[in-house]
Amino acid sequence: MNKNQLKVLVVDDEAAIRDMIRFALEKNKMDVQTAANAHEALIRVSEKRPDIILLDWMMPNVSGLELTRRLRKDPFTQDIPIIMLTAKVTEDDKVAGLEAGTDDYVTKPFSPRELLARIQAVTRRTNPADEDGRMVAGVLTLDTVSKRVLASNREIPIGPTEFRLLEFFMAHAGRAYNRSQILDHVWGPNVYLEERTVDVHIRRLRKALEPARASEYLQTVRGHGYRFLVTD
């Protein structure tokens, strides 16, 4: 196997769908594993950590939504991009999926071409730094090498904690995180701080981004936490 191949785990209780997806992805030079349920999926993940998971929402016993929540709680799997395969299309369902930690969804029935496009979009979004270590979102450019943030080529003064917070959000654009998850990702799981610490640094980061008119990229998700989304 080529070490640069994208490793994909397909989790669906319908064998015909698993086989169709496997054929399409292997044809596009991806390394594909499959699982028929959540239990099998956890075994596959422990054997070989995938780069992305395609996960059916409606599975018996443990749903795709519940499996997503479990994966997001485990430090080993919390950053693996997840695309939900679902016939659910209501706004409430979309919000539930995003809040559980999914990165995108594909509505059944779907074509292999659409699925490939979604995979490519999610992998670009969850691995956003270019070969020079730059991440771009809207008017912002974050340089992971020089630790600078630019807006229209003008540097934005920003503290080290706010830099880490922005880097985290830009790397996971569109996904909603609660305060506990943000603390774990930005400060580390073994650092014990009050959750309101997140609110303090979010306010500081918004203030730093105001001159660039980018403070609105940091959105409050009522009853949950925050997400980063470019609205331009």
Image (cartoon, rainbow, N blue to C red):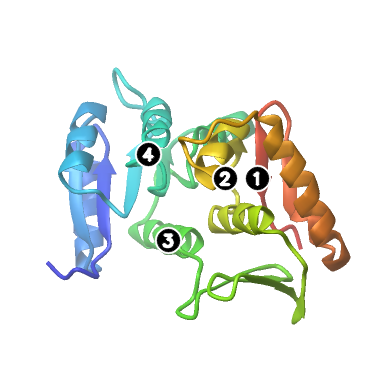
Q: Local crowd at mark 2 within 10 Å, few (<14), some, or many (≥20)?
A: many
Q: Residue furthest left?
A: 1
Q: Which residue is mark 4?
A: 75
Q: What is the secondary structure assignment of the residue under circle 1?
A: strand
| Residue at horizontal 32 percent and vertical 41 percent from the top | 76
Q: Which residue is mark 1?
A: 227
Where does the image place residue 185, in percent across and percent down from the top left?
51, 44
The relative height of residue 16 versus residue 88 in the rendered view (above or below) is below
Residue 176 appears in which quarter of the rendering? top right
Q: Are marks 2 and 4 in contact (CB under 8 Å)?
A: no
CA gap, disc 2 and disc 4: 17 Å
CA gap, disc 1 and disc 3: 18 Å
CA gap, disc 1 and disc 2: 6 Å
| Residue at horizontal 49 percent and vertical 42 percent from the top | 188
Q: Amino acid at mark 3?
A: Thr
Q: Are marks 1 and 3 in contact (CB under 8 Å)?
A: no
Give the number of the disc on residue 123.
3
Where does the image place residue 165, in percent across and percent down from the top left?
63, 52
Give the number of the disc on residue 175.
2
First along the sequence among labels 4 and 1: 4
Q: Amino acid at mark 4?
A: Pro
Q: What is the secondary structure assignment of the residue under circle 3?
A: helix
Q: Residue furthest right?
A: 211
Give the mark toward the camera: 3 or 4.
4
Where does the image place residue 155, in percent across and percent down from the top left?
76, 75
Q: Local crowd at mark 4 within 10 Å, few (<14), some, or many (≥20)?
A: few
